Amino acid sequence: MAALEGQKAPDFSLEGSDGKTHSLADYAGKRVVIYFYPKDSTPGCTKEACTFRDLHGQLQDLEVMVLGVSKDSLASHDKFIAKFGLPFVLLSDPDTTMLQAYHAFGEKVMYGKKSLGTIRSTVVIGPDGTVLKHWAKVKKAETHPSEVLEFLKAY
C-alpha cells in the first residue's frame, strides 16, 4: 500500500454528524486532519477520539480542522459524540468509498485472523489539498493524536 504523501488528496462527499454534506473543497485553504477508525464506542476508537478531543484547543490554535471517519451510521456517531463530548465532526462512510480512496479499508489481521475492515490511519491535508502526512497504520490509538499534533507544530 503506497503512502499518499505528496499526492492530491482524494475528493469525498459524505454526510457529517453536523447534518451537512462535507467534501474536500469545503476545506480549501485550511489544514485538515482526517482520522479513520473502525467503530464508535470501542475501546481503541474511544481512546483515540477522546485524545483528539483533549487536544482540540491546541489544534484550533494551529487553525487545524479535525474530521473522524468510520462506517458507522450518523445515529451511532451522534451517540458517540454525546457520550464523550467530541467537539469535531464525524463523517459516515457506510459504503467505504472514502475509506478505500484513502487506503483505510482492506485486509487486516486481528488475533491471527484475517478479515476485511477499516484500517486505523490518519492523513494531514495541506491548504492546497495535498497530503502532507499519511500514517497508513496507526499502532497506538491513545498516543497517536499527540503525534499528529507534534507533526503539525513542526510543519
Image: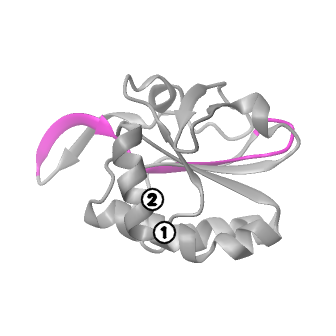
Question: Looking at the image, is 116 positioned above or below residue 135?
Answer: above
Question: Which circle marks residue 51 in the picture?
Answer: none
Q: Nearer the viewer, residue 90 or 33?
A: 90
> Visible in this render: residue 27?
yes
Q: Which residues are magenta?
A: 112-130
Identify the residue under disc 1. 85
Q: Nearer the viewer, residue 63 or 130?
A: 63
Looking at the image, residue 114 sits to the left or right of residue 7; the answer is: left
Picture coordinates of residue 93 (x, y %)? 44, 31
Find numbered disc 1 in the image and state the secondary structure of the residue it sits on.
Answer: loop
Q: Are marks 1 and 2 in contact (CB under 8 Å)?
A: yes
Identify the residue under disc 2. 81
| Residue type pointed to by label 1 | Gly
Tell me the distance, in whole angstroms, between the alpha carbons under discs 1 and 2: 5 Å
| Residue type pointed to by label 2 | Ile
Based on the displayed image, in which of its 4 quarters is residue 105 positioned?
Answer: top left
Question: Looking at the image, is 7 positioned above or below residue 126?
Answer: above
The C terminus, quarter of image: bottom right
Question: Looking at the image, is 143 positioned above or below residue 125?
Answer: below
Image point (58%, 39%), residue name: 3
- Magenta segment includes 79: no
